[in-house]
Image (cartoon, rainbow, N blue to C red):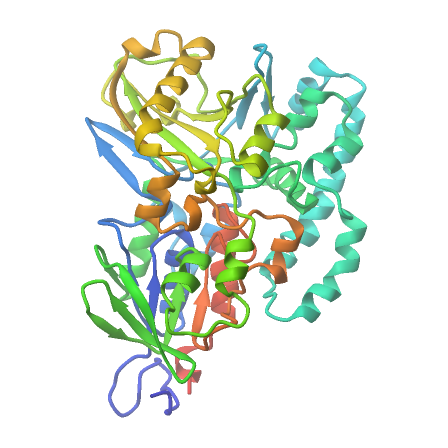
């Protein structure tokens, strides 16, 4: 099948057919990979299980409200610039990205608020409100955060960790920068006030990690946000998804919805295409899976004897938390509620222990509250607000019957919001829906219903994470949150770059 050298345009000189690539899933990682492969001369088909693009970034339109179901915080905008430039365009041709100022509020249970922003002087004032002695400590922490960013993201995130030698070569510098510390541990080395320690270390929760467990390399997020800002796409994150789909299609790539992959076809140890749930067989020279890595190996390669990612290893892996997300629209506006806010519960460390270790659904909880209509009123009918409340919960190992508990939990979230930042909420809700970890499993094919794949602890990062070039099957590549470098929009888009750099130009494929 792979025998002839390609002409300059990537086509087979005899038949005039381009080399074929299949991308499974249309999340950010899958779409970014498809764009890059189109630019390399491949004919690309993107296969999506759902009836529209985005994966975890799918959009629900209901009762005149627009609900982004997944990521809402856009950082590292230059990664988007790269994709548009590959297609001879600018991001501004298709999107209106707005920089947020401030970024978000962290509201503690006693009502005190810490506001994060990219304004260095304002951050020092915020620090001083809680602990004047920590202002200088904060500056030192941000210096360390920049050093971690320079090495950990600007450097290592773009490196393929297919080879253990790469990990061993990186280890001394990693130990110099963070040692074996966790995010919370490194923040605590510099910051003394307990509330500031929480506010400056909660970022890993946005990518599926417990700040008390994940490697301190993720302290790079503090500098990433401070230096590059937090952005919002007018119209919602779904507009960014639409823009990426447009880039795929403008290069000749094809999007296929309601097209769930049943299995990846393998011949003589090499991926040769896929078989869909409806029995359709599609051949390809390479296959890229943007599906959850554990799901890919466990469900889509039934006849492959796996050497590394065995069923036992997959089951022993520590996975990120699950997510309960309530999407709701109100018949009035809550003008004093910011675009992004973290509403913390009565406990913090104990709650995270319940979620990540005890696998127990707690009556206490914290949440991320998203109000996009604070910036873009068009995402709701006139005079109304669009919200989502995202609550970290245990993944499906907790054995919670969400069919029974889902509505009960939603009501608890509503009560908590009424008591804190949205008084009178219950009388204003006119549109409502929610998703649970069970929905992540059944709808998004997330292993154990985990929201972000494996938890990014140090022994599940870099070389220890699923490789971008499959260890099990030639011609199969992995992209997205469950692979290197990890979850979050910057992580998954960067994983697409790593995948692309490991795939030859179509004309070079033999």
- Please state the total of marks drawn on the protein image: 0
96, 472: nearer the viewer: 472
The residue drawn where x is 48% and y is 71% is 306
- Residue 506 seen by the camera: yes
The residue drawn where x is 65% and y is 57% is 155
Q: Quadrant of the N terminus?
A: bottom left
204, 220: nearer the viewer: 204
Furthest-top residue in view?
A: 424
- Placement of 202 over or under 443, stated as above or below: above
428, 38: nearer the viewer: 428
* Residue 96 sits in quarter: top left
Residue 14 placement (x, y as % from top left): 27, 92
The residue drawn where x is 51% and y is 20% is 364
- Placement of 476 over or under 104, stated as above or below: below
Residue 191 placement (x, y as % from top left): 76, 27
The residue drawn where x is 74% and y is 20% is 193
- Residue 102 seen by the camera: no
Residue 289 lies left or right of residue 242; in this view the side is right
Residue 504 placement (x, y as % from top left): 46, 77
* Residue 240 sits in quarter: top left
Q: Quadrant of the C terminus?
A: bottom left
Residue 402 placement (x, y as % from top left): 35, 33
374, 364: nearer the viewer: 364
Residue 42 lies left or right of residue 150; in this view the side is left
- Placement of 356 over or under 199, stated as above or below: below
């Amino acid at each position: 099948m792979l025998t002839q050298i390609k002409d300059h345009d990537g086509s087979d000189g005899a038949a005039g057919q381009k080399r074929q690539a299949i991308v499974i899933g249309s999340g950010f990682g899958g779409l970014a990979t498809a764009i890059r492969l189109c630019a390399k001369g491949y004919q690309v088909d993107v296969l999506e299980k759902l009836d529209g693009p985005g994966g975890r970034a799918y959009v629900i339109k209901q009762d005149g409200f627009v609900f982004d179901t997944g990521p809402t915080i856009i950082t590292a905008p230059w990664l988007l610039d790269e994709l548009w430039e590959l297609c001879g365009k600018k991001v501004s041709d298709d999107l209106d990205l707005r920089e947020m100022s401030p970024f978000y509020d962290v509201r503690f249970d006693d009502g005190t608020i810490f506001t994060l922003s990219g304004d260095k002087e304002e951050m020092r004032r915020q620090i001083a409100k809680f602990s004047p002695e920590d202002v200088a400590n904060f500056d030192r922490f941000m210096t360390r955060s920049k050093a971690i960013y320079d090495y950990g993201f600007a450097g290592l995130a773009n490196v393929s960790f297919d080879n253990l030698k790469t990990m061993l070569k990186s280890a001394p510098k990693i130990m110099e920068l963070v040692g074996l510390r966790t995010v919370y541990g490194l923040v605590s080395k510099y910051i003394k006030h307990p509330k500031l320690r929480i506010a400056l270390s909660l970022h890993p929760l946005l990518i599926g990690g417990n700040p008390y467990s994940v490697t301190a390399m993720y302290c790079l997020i503090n500098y990433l946000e401070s230096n590059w800002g937090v952005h919002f796409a007018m119209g919602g994150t779904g507009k960014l998804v639409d823009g990426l789909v447009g880039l795929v299609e403008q290069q000749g790539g094809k999007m296929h919805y309601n097209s769930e992959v049943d299995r990846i076809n393998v011949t003589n140890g090499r991926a040769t295409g896929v078989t869909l749930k409806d029995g359709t067989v599609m051949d390809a020279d390479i296959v890229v899976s943007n599906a959850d890595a554990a799901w890919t190996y466990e469900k889509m390669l039934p006849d492959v004897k796996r050497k590394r990612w065995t069923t036992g290893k997959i089951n022993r892996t520590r996975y990120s938390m699950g997510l309960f997300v309530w999407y709701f629209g109100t018949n009035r506006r809550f003008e004093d509620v910011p675009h992004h806010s973290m509403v913390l519960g009565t406990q913090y460390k104990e709650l995270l222990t319940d979620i990540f270790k005890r696998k127990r659904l707690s009556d206490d909880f914290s949440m991320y509250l998203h109000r996009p209509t604070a910036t873009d009123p068009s995402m709701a009918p006139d005079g109304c607000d669009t919200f989502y409340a995202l609550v970290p919960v245990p993944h499906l190992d907790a054995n919670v019957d969400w069919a029974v508990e889902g509505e009960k939990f939603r009501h608890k979230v509503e009560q908590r919001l009424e008591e804190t930042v949205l008084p009178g909420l219950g009388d204003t809700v006119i549109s409502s829906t929610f998703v649970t970890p069970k929905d992540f499993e059944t709808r998004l094919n997330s292993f154990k219903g985990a929201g972000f794949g494996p938890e990014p602890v140090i022994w599940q990062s870099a070389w220890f994470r699923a490789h971008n070039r499959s260890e099990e099957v030639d011609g199969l590549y992995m992209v997205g949150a469950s692979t290197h470098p990890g979850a979050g929009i910057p992580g998954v888009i960067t994983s697409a770059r790593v995948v692309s750099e490991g795939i030859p130009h179509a004309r070079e494929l033999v």
